[in-house]
Amino acid sequence: MVTIKDLNTPKKNTWCPGCGNFGILSAFKGALVELGFEREQVVMVSGIGCHGKINDYVNVNGFHGIHGRVLPLATGIKLVNPDLTVIGFSGDSDCYDEGWDHFCHAIRRNIDITLIVHNNMILGLTTGQATSTSMPGFKTKSTPFGAIPPALNPLAHALVAHGTFVARGFAGDPKHLQSLIVEAVRHKGFGYIDVFQPCVTFNYLNTYDWFRKRVYKLQDEGHDVTSREKAIEKSFEWGDRIPIGIFYKEERPTYRDNLTHIKNTPLTKVPIDDVNINSLLEEMK
Ligand SMILES: Cc1ncc(C[n+]2csc(CCOP(=O)(O)OP(=O)(O)O)c2C)c(N)n1
Ligand code: SF4
C-alpha cells in the first residue's frame, strides 16, 4: 500500500506560495493513502492551467491532456481498462468553459470516474481573466468594468444532469476535502467535487478569508443527501453562508454496466495476436 513518501516526485513545484492547489494536492495524497491503493492502480488526467501541473507532483500514472478535454480522456481510459481508478483534475475554465459539453454528458452517462475541479473563479495560468464562475462585477484583465453575466452554478447543472455524486470542498480545509475525495472515489459512478481553490495571485476577491467567513458543512446540519430537490435548493445558497460537503448521492448503473459487448471483456484484455489488418490496409490504398 502506498505511503505519502512513495507519492512524492522530484519535480520542483512552481505554484505560487499559498496557492489553494497545495490544499488539493495534500488532500489527494492523503486520500490515496487512506484508500490503500497501489500506485499502478491510479491514473490522474489533468487539463491545461495551473491545476494541470498536479500530475507532476504525484508519483502515479498521469496523462496531461489538452485544454477542456480531461473528461473524454478519462472516459476512454476507464472504458478500455476498468481495473484502473481514474481521477480527473480540471480548472474552472478548463471544465466549465472549454470543457462544458463534456462535463454535462460525462455526468449524465455516469462514467465510473472521479472529477476534481480546482475552482478559483479566474484563469490562473493565463494571468487573471474572468471565467464562467467569476462573480458579477469582478474586475479582471478581461473584464475591466466588472464581469457582466451571472456566474454559472456548476453544482446545480450537475444535479439536473442526473449526477450521482455531487459535492463541494474547500482547499483551505484539506482534511474535510480528503474525506470527500475518498467517498467520491469509492462511489460507483461519476464522483464530482467542485473545490473552492483560492488563487492568491489573481483573485483578490475570493480569498481564503472570504471563504472562511462563509463556508459551512452540510453534514453538520443534517442535510439529506438522498433528496435531489433539497440538493438543488442547497446548490443555490450563496452569500453570507455557502455550503460545502456532499449535496447528493445515489446508486445507479454506470455507463459501462450497460455496454454489454465490452462489459465482461475489457478492450485491453481482447487478444490481438490473430488479428490481421492487411485486408483493411489494402482497401484504403
Ligand atoms: C485549446 C486551448 N485554448 C486556450 C488555451 C490557453 N489557456 C491556457 S491555460 C487556460 C485556462 C486556465 O484557467 P483554468 O482552467 O481555470 O486553470 P487555472 O490556471 O486557473 O488552474 C487557457 C484558456 C490553451 N492552452 N489551449
Ligand atoms: S496563478 Fe493562482 S492558481 Fe496559479 S499557481 Fe499562482 S496562485 Fe495558484
Image (tube, rainbow, N blue to C red):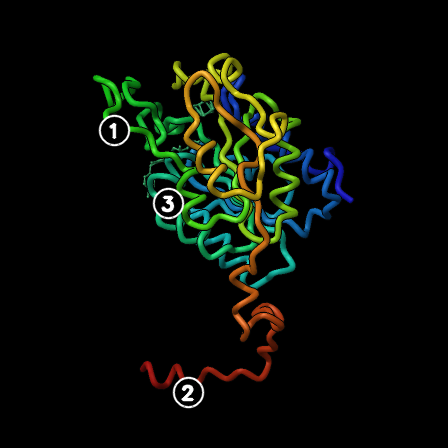
Q: Earlier in the sequence, mark 3 or mark 2?
A: 3
Q: Position of residue 99 (x, y in %)?
A: 37, 45
Residue 104's place in the image compared with 96, above or below, is: below
Residue drawn at point x = 41 percent, y = 19 percent? 239
Would you say the residues marked 2 and 1 are in contact, meaning their CB atoms lie under 8 Å apart? no
Task: Identify the residue position indicated by label 2 in the image.
Answer: 279
Residue reaching furthest to the left: 145
Residue 279's place in the image compared with 78, above or below, is: below
| Kind of element beneath mark 2 | helix
Task: Identify the residue position indicated by label 3 in the image.
Answer: 99
Could you tell whether 95 is left or right of 140 in the image? right
Q: Earlier in the sequence, mark 2 or mark 1?
A: 1
What separation in Å lies between label 3 and label 2 (alpha carbons)?
Answer: 38 Å
Q: Identify the image quadrant of residue 147.
A: top left
Residue 149's tag is: 1
Task: Give the class, few, some or many, for how many residues have Cα within 10 Å of label 2's Cα (few <14, many ≥20).
Answer: few
**Amino acid at pointer 3:** Gly
Q: Position of residue 52 (x, y in %)?
A: 48, 37
| Kind of element beneath mark 1 | loop
Q: Position of residue 154 (x, y in %)?
A: 41, 37
Quick one: quadrant of the C terminus? Answer: bottom left
